[in-house]
Amino acid sequence: MLIDETFFTGELHIEGIISYSGVPAKTNEAANYELKSLIAQYELEFYRKILGYDKAKEFVQYIENGEVEEKWDNLKNMLVEQVGDRKISPIAYYVFFFYLRKNQTQATPIGNIDESSSNKVTPCNIKMTSAWNQMAYLNRYLSDFLYNNQDDYGGYFFDEHLLEFMNQMGI
């Protein structure tokens, strides 16, 4: 896949993902495993929403095989941008949104515990909204690119929901 834990810095920072001491703790490993699992799920979902099922499958094969093909290289460059020492991608914002959504509640044997039930935890809807809107902003360029090059990608399949901004109420 194109993204990994190194994308989750700055405004996408997730505590415990990157070990700053050089010695990974068990909590770091657990957090990293959870993030990698979500990346695998939501990165593929993102590709399907922008390319359609078949072309997403082709793109993933291209990434995994390390082949050189101009149309996929161009798409890859649209999906990952290096800005200084930071990597930016609409995929990372998409994954971050779902990471926050998943972690708003904690499943227990007696039911789900809402994050607001603790005085120490603040709701993350502001961060979720910000992440989604930044992804939607970046997707405008991606959508234009795919529309202008639709012959290379078997048509234009972009899910319009990925272009919509949301407010803090999720609408």
Image (tube, rainbow, N blue to C red):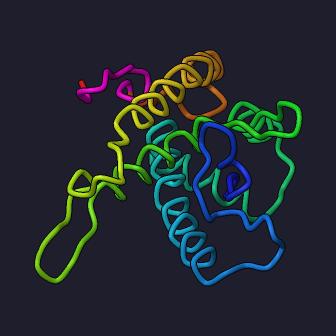
Check the image and name the residue furthest to the front.
119
State the count of labels. 0
Q: Is residue 66 above or below residue 133?
A: below
Q: What span is in magenta? A: 160-170
The answer to which of 169 and 56 lies nearer the viewer is 169
**Is 67 covered by the magenta stretch?**
no
Check the image and name the residue furthest to the left.
110
**60 left or right of 98?**
right
The main secondary structure of the magenta stretch is loop
Residue occupying the point 62% across, 18% down: 141
The answer to which of 21 and 62 lies nearer the viewer is 21
Q: Quadrant of the C terminus?
A: top left
Residue occupying the point 74% across, 54% down: 6
Q: Position of residue 105 (x, y in %)?
A: 26, 60
Residue occupying the point 53% across, 25% down: 134
The answer to which of 24 and 50 lies nearer the viewer is 24
Residue occupying the point 34% across, 50% down: 101
Q: Is residue 164 above or below residue 153?
A: above
Q: Is residue 127 above or below residue 57?
A: above
The answer to which of 2 and 97 lies nearer the viewer is 97
**Is 162 covered by the magenta stretch?**
yes
Q: Position of residue 37 (x, y in %)?
A: 51, 69
